[in-house]
Image: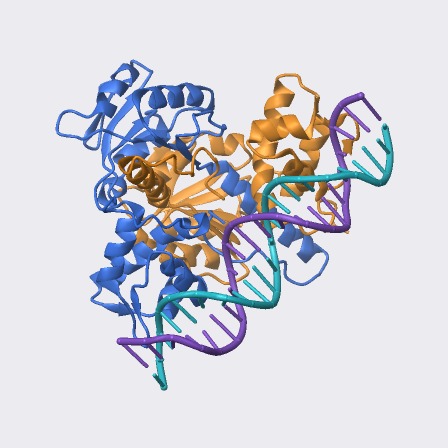
Chain colours: A orange, B blue, C cyan, D purple
Amino acid sequence: MAPTSRGRRIPEATVARLPEYLRILVDLFQTGTNNVSSEELADLAGVNAAKVRKDLSYLGTYGTRGVGYEVEYLIYQVRRELGLTHDWPVVIVGAGNLGQALAGYGGFGARGFPVAGIVDLDPSKIGLRIGDATVRSLDDLGAIVRGGLGGGPVSIGVVATPAPAAQGAADRLVQAGVTSILNFAPVLLNVPSTVSVRKVDLAVELQILSYYEQRRAAANAAAAPRVPGGSRQGASA
Amino acid sequence: MAPTSRGRRIPEATVARLPEYLRILVDLFQTGTNNVSSEELADLAGVNAAKVRKDLSYLGTYGTRGVGYEVEYLIYQVRRELGLTHDWPVVIVGAGNLGQALAGYGGFGARGFPVAGIVDLDPSKIGLRIGDATVRSLDDLGAIVRGGLGGGPVSIGVVATPAPAAQGAADRLVQAGVTSILNFAPVLLNVPSTVSVRKVDLAVELQILSYYEQRRAAANAAAAPRVPGGSRQGASA
DNA sequence: CATTGTGAAGCGTTTCACAGCC
DNA sequence: GGCTGTGAAACGCTTCACAATG
């Protein structure tokens, strides 16, 4: 059996919350807290305690009744479950505003996702230095993904191109061997079903906020009471 | 009654998909298509046709049986429902990598969210020009939100600060009168329940991808068949 | 007669409530 | 006594299946 997975199938909704718990647990650990109850964790994550317990129960029975969870041990278990026991280098396609910001933002590397490379079609961008990386030609994608130069193979690609170029970028990534894609372009990517895609569309987030803004405005105009849709947080909901 | 809202309560899941439909409809319109069936729309959005019909039915009965939906009219109705009949200026707090990228990225303005201002605590950043905007002092936040200088009042704020500064930024935004916040910092913001928050955490998205990557690797190592979690798209799931 | 609009069934997620255990 | 782990109930969302209809 593989050492990193107990083979349990974890609900998608739970998987989406585990990174949040992990972040909180690491915070707690760094401030010297070594035990946490489902209720504290729930408060910090902005969710319900039963949900925390059920979520964590999918990983195994790592709590102690009457006591809570040992923070350090739980961090280890959540990391293991998420596959964060090793770094995952990422390659970024598109060195425009967003691509540059992502490559220059140290937070990625700090959280286990070092930038293995950034590529662009535009020859005028090639050679540009951003953080630790240098913009390379799209033709170098294969080499970057294969690894070499001290880096292992890359399985995660980030599409940070304008919309019209996104499908081409995804095709190149898939062809190069990437099996997960984080897509910032506002288009549906067509990829083999063996490839995972997550999409982040910043304008969509604003449009969702606009909906609730507008509802509130309409409700206020009608001198009616509060409209829901308050401070539930986490876009992935 | 308010002219912009029929007062129906639309499920959150539907609200999150409407911007996607809207994007596709605008694309279709621009390429000269003036009628679309729920099935075509569903294909383009990567969802099921029944879901499209049910989603659109929350807005009203705007389709024609045996024919489909008139693209232009549907665009108008979706826009109205999302509150996109007018622009929503946004103010960005934090002029680091991400804040600069967001301010410099024309896509926001193009989609109805012009940048009314960008502010930062750091005096060395103040005065920096990014796109059409100039970085101003955090102290100018109130003035920016109030409007003036041709802009109306701002109700949407974007938090693009490092994690430790995010709560302070949110407090200032709320105090200035902002009622919706898009938060890019990896922290839970504490705000009054009258304020909407959506959170986008790029590292979380990568961690979710990592989970499925790791599952796949584990499954392959065990010479077992495919693990699910394929190309379902849209992070907000 | 193609396609919408929608009750009703199905399914995944959340929440409750409490037995089990430290 | 306090807190976890978890069946079972409640809920919301998705999908089915078909009657309604231009």
For residue B49, say whether it is visible: yes
Q: Residue at x 70, y 61 (%)?
A: B224
Residue A186 in the image, given as x and y percentages of width and height: 35, 51
| Quarter of the rendering containing residue A132 | top left
A58, above or below B166, in the image? below
Q: Residue at x 32, y 63 (%)?
A: B61
Residue A153 in the image, given as x and y percentages of width and height: 55, 47
Q: Residue at x 31, y 34 (%)?
A: B101
Residue B40 in the image, given as x and y percentages of width and height: 36, 69
Q: Is residue A32 left or right of residue B159?
A: right
* Figure disc tally: 0
Farthest residue, direction left: B150
Seen from the viewer's position, the closer of residues A136 and B207 is: B207
A105, above or below B66, in the image? above
For residue A87, say whether it is visible: no
Seen from the viewer's position, the closer of residues A140 and A6 is: A6
Q: Is residue A189 left or right of residue B124?
A: right
Seen from the viewer's position, the closer of residues A181 and B189 is: B189
Residue A11 in the image, given as x and y percentages of width and height: 63, 50
